[in-house]
Image (cartoon, rainbow, N blue to C red):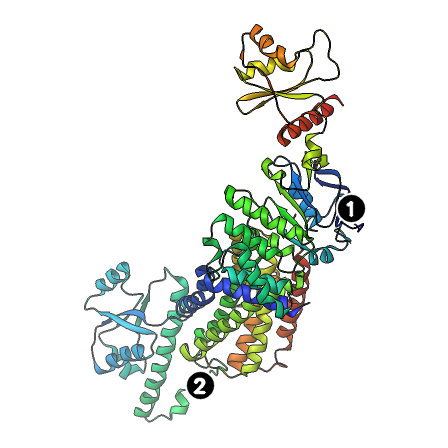
Amino acid sequence: MNFRRLFALAYKETLQIWRDPRSLAIALLMPLMQMGILGYGVSLDIKHVPLCVYDQENSQQSRSLVQDFVSSGWFSISRRFEREADIRDAMDRGSCNAAIVVPVNFSRTLAMNGTAPVQAIFDATDVNTTNIALGYAQGVMAQASAELATRWAAAHGIQPSLVSQIDLEPSTWFNETLDSRYFIIPGVVAVILALVGAQLTSLTISREWERGTMEQLISTPVTALEVMLGKLTPYFMIGLIDAGFCLAAAIFWFHVPFRGNVITLFTTSMLFLIVVLGIGYLISVRIRSQLGASQVALLVTMLPTSLLSGYTFPIDQMPAAIQALTLVVYARYYVTILRGIFLKGSSLTDLWMPIAGLSVYALLIIWLAARAFHKRIN
Amino acid sequence: MNAVAPMVVAHGLTKHFHDFVAVDHLDLSINAGEVVGFIGPNGAGKSTTIRMLCGLIQPSEGSATVAGFDVGKQAEAVREHIGYMSQKFSLYGDLTVRENLRFFSGIYRVPRREIGERMAFAITMAGLAGREDTLVRTLAGGWKQRLALGCAILHRPPVLFLDEPTSGVEPEARRRFWDLIHDLAAEGVTTLVSTHYMDEAEYCNRIALIDRGKLIALGSPRELRNLPLGGELFEIRCTPLGAALKVLIQAPGVVDAAIFGDALHVVLGVNHKGKNTLSAADLPNFLAQQGIHAEPAQQVLPSLEDVFVQLVTRGQEERDMS
């Protein structure tokens, strides 16, 4: 192991990355684009469901109820109608997914009975969205009912506590606003680092074989270990820059609460980078065409990371066999670590399990990568 | 040369690729300061042999040492002592002349205080003064080859392996390249250089002819020329060439005949002159009887190409018989 040779390789590789528009784009533009697309595009929240309103009564009380829907933030009124048939039309055309119909005698019934029916109609072609919207609607109604009940009770001289006997107080920790973005963005960081890291390094060896420069390189006294470390060093630096960028975007742009320690964040990110760069390097050694290597790298990073890391689909809701499969998906450990650091402020000791998982992975990959490259022509 | 151990020695060096025998029990010994030309048709096993000697391919059988180190077991030590130019141009096209040189200086661990001087030497040698900051991929073939040689000798290796360094390079640039090789040889560098240009064989101290993985002749250009062709060589211009070849190859007294450019090269036996064997003077008449127009035959000194064709054909006939 000679540091001059290592440095010569690292410097050469840096120059080549700097002069290759494709590598530069992967290194610098891809994280930016992915962060934008995944950060904004992937959200499990349903906000501003287009709502049609057919307020037959149009009283102060009915308007207040409609306002409750709007101010919840989950619905936004797209149209107001005067006929029931219009609702059907709007649903057919897709201009609204939900509708509420307030009956003509709403406030009178409410005043007399203390309760009054309101009709809510949902377009259930998208079951998922409907279920969530339905949940939101019930939430809005429950809150509105509670307030009305309190007022009704007061008006009738009944102790409010007797009316609302059961008062459910849901308490959510760590992601208080139940914003799925907080849950997803740390996962997005993992996806981007895996994708970019493996993409970049997957080309580093195959490019030299393809261009014929490898034969020259292996005729020199350079060792396989020096080739690996010399080539991976610049990509490690790029990976750290990308990690810094993605994490900064998560905190300052998407406002994901950051409760942990920056050092914990970077040590674990470095561990993850070692794994993804190592995987890309292994692919590059095995597959001697750049195109093939890049496609395999895409396959082994993108698919497992986006499907099995738990970044969007919770692992504990997967079938047992798939859950077992996720244990070999290196990204799941990093996703767990990132969520822990971001949302719970977990420390290294809290996260010892996923860190141990990732470390075992890193050691295995380094071991395989160091043995993979031979200075021989097949 | 002093009585020093040879710089390159191969004993029964063999390489199989599955069923195909690329190099077949090759024996070779090259002394320090010698320039040996490796000549043979494409696919004869020149590159495979050179790659084995550089430690890039593990031999299937046999052994070889370079600068005293075993190519199989001490490949890294071998690589410290060699400069290699592969058949395909193999510098970094997206780096400049200077960056390539600096990279290989680092890889070869050229002593720091000598880097400047050696890089300057390589630049001058390649004729690239003033173009140090040009991207290598924009250079013309001859410059690229000279720069590749410059990179391969930055660490002053005692042995150079050059695999078809002049292929695809214009003649003037080829000549300049050979001048460089001779300059290096004068300093004691041992060189094994493969080529498929026959004229380049003349620049070598010794020539190794290789065909189908077998070394079929080894000697100085003069020795090879005098290799008994089995007779005297004559050139005869005649039309049509193909018909003349068919007739002559079976004629009494003719050892061999081959088309050479727009004429025939005919080897006439010297030792078994009899009544019904042909002499050079008989050739035009003999051909005329077959309806072939021919000019008088001229004796020629065999070119290396003749020798080579002769040896390859003989080898084939021997194979056919066995």
* SS at badge 1: strand
Q: Residues within 10 Å of mark 2 (few under 14, many from 20)?
A: few
Residue B113 visible in the snapshot: yes
Lateral position of residue A162 relative to residue A56, left or right: right
Depth check: give the residue in front, B241 or B263: B263
Q: Is residue B227 above or below residue B143?
A: above
Front in this rendered view, residue A282 or A15: A15
Q: CA distance from mark 2 to mark 1?
A: 89 Å
Q: Identity of the amino acid at label 1? A: Ser
Residue closest to the eye, B56 or B258: B258
**Relative to B54, residue A237 above or below:** below
The numbered disc on residue A48 is: none
Q: Position of residue A64 (x, y in %)?
A: 26, 81
Which amino acid, by three-letter code, is at mark 2?
Asp
Residue under pointer 1: B63
At 41% from the left and 87% from the top, the residue drawn is A164
Nearer the viewer's eye, disc 2 or disc 1?
1
**Residue sitting farthest toward the left:** A82
Q: Is residue A292 visible?
A: no
Q: Which mark is residue A167?
A: 2
> How many C-alpha atoms fall within 10 Å of the one at disc 1: few (<14), some, or many (≥20)?
many
Q: Where is A211 relative to B26, above or below?
A: below
Say which quadrant the C terminus of chain B sits in. top right
Query: How far across and how far down the image is residue B28, in percent?
Result: 75, 42
Q: Position of residue A328 (x, y in %)?
A: 62, 63
Residue at coordinates 60% horizontally, 66% vertically from top-left?
B115
